[in-house]
Each structure stands twice: as C-alpha cells, then as structure tokens.
Image (cartoon, helix red, strand yellow):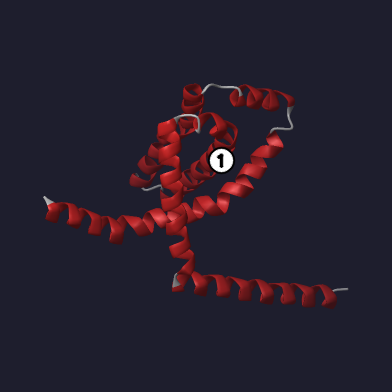
C-alpha cells in the first residue's frame, strides 16, 4: 500500500503538478485585472444592490453563491469539449478560454464579496489557508524556475524593442 501511495504521489508531482501550476499562474495573472473589471460593474445600481445582498449572506449561503458560477460554467466547458471532439477545435478552444476568463472574473469578484462570511466557517478557513500556502509555494517555485526567468527576460526585451520601434515609427511619420 505504501508503494502504491508513493507511486501516486510521484505521478502527481511529475505530471499533474506542472499542469496545476500553469493553471494557477494563469489564474494569478488574471485574478486581479479581472476582479478590477468586475469592480466596474459594481458601479451599476442593480449590480451594486446584488453585491450588497451577497455581502450580507450567512456563511453557508455565501458558500453556495460562491460555487454557483463554477457549476454553471461546467456544462459550457463540456459543450466546448464536445465541439472539439467533433472537429471544431478552434470554436471549442475559444469557448473554453472565454468560459475560463468569465469564470475567473466572476469567481474573483464573488470571493472578494463572500470571503468574510466564508472565513467564519472553521473548516473552510482551515482548508483555504492550507490551499493558499500550497498555491503560493507552487507559484513561487514556478517563478523561480529557469524557464520562467528566461521567459520573463525575453518578454521584457521584446517589450523594450517594441517600444523603441514604435517610438522610431512615430518620429518618422511626424
């Protein structure tokens, strides 16, 4: 039994962990900007009224509201995978990406609204703090990895060259 458990952990570490890390880095990258985008919706009177209602929810109602978008988007993602399996790869990929962006935006905003209520649930608070520590450690490992540092340096170089090129073009056409 110990051998099987060690095998599963090893398989997880070398196969699923990199995929989870990529997903977490994407979510981390998108979480704040998408949450700010959703903040703009809060300026609408009906939206701000809904948000005030969500903020006042008791813990288990907040938990339900927090998980509804994830459950709602699941059929959309399954439909996208169906389209991919039927040969409509681009359409399926676009739907998956759109659902991921929309889902991340909504979940980020809902978590911001429901976190105080959710943290009053001892089991949720305990799991969240463990999840957050694990996630932060994994993201730190990704950001300290050689491929990540190379990609960041390349990205900075490309941005600098692009800025210089754009400035040169602007001056040339004045």
* Rendered-image quadrant of the C terminus: bottom right
* Up/down of 3 relative to 160, above or below: above
Residue 166, percent from left and from top: 75, 72
Q: Mark 1 points at which residue?
A: 108
* Up/down of 39 relative to 57, above or below: below
Q: Which of 140 and 29 is in front in this view?
A: 140
Residue 26 as seen in the image, left or right of residue 34: left
How many marks on residues? 1
Q: Residue at x 49, y 22 (%)?
A: 61
Q: Nearer the viewer, residue 108 or 168?
A: 108
Q: Where on the picture, by quarter, is residue 56?
A: top right
Residue 67, percent from left and from top: 46, 31
* Up/down of 172 relative to 139, above or below: below
Q: Which residue is drawn at 68% across and 23% down?
A: 49
Residue 126, percent from left and from top: 42, 39
Q: Where on the picture, by quarter, is residue 53?
A: top right
SS assignment at label 1:
helix
User: How crowded is the residue under tag 1: few (<14 C-alpha within 10 Å), some, or many (20+)?
Assistant: many
Residue 102, percent from left and from top: 55, 40
Q: Which residue is drawn at 28% across and 55% down?
A: 12
Residue 13 as seen in the image, left or right of residue 32: left
Q: Determine the residue located farthest toward the right in the rendered image.
A: 174
* Up/down of 69 relative to 152, above or below: above
Q: Residue at x 61, y 45 (%)?
A: 34
């Amino acid at each position: 039994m110990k051998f099987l458990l060690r095998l599963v952990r090893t398989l997880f570490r070398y196969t699923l962990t990199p995929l989870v890390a990529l997903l977490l880095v994407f979510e981390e990258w998108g979480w704040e900007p998408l949450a700010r985008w959703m903040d703009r919706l809060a300026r609408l009177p009906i939206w701000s009224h809904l948000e005030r209602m969500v903020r006042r929810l008791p813990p288990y109602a907040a938990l339900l509201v927090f998980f509804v978008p994830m459950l709602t988007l699941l059929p959309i993602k399954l439909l996208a995978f169906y389209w991919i399996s039927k040969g409509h790869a681009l359409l399926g990929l676009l739907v998956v990406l759109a659902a991921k962006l929309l889902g991340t935006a909504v979940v980020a905003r809902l978590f911001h609204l429901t976190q105080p209520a959710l943290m009053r649930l001892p089991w949720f608070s305990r799991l969240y703090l463990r999840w957050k520590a694990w996630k932060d450690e994994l993201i730190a490992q990704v950001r300290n990895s050689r491929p990540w540092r190379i990609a960041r340096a390349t990205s900075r170089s490309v941005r600098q060259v692009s800025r210089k090129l754009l400035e040169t073009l602007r001056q040339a056409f004045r």
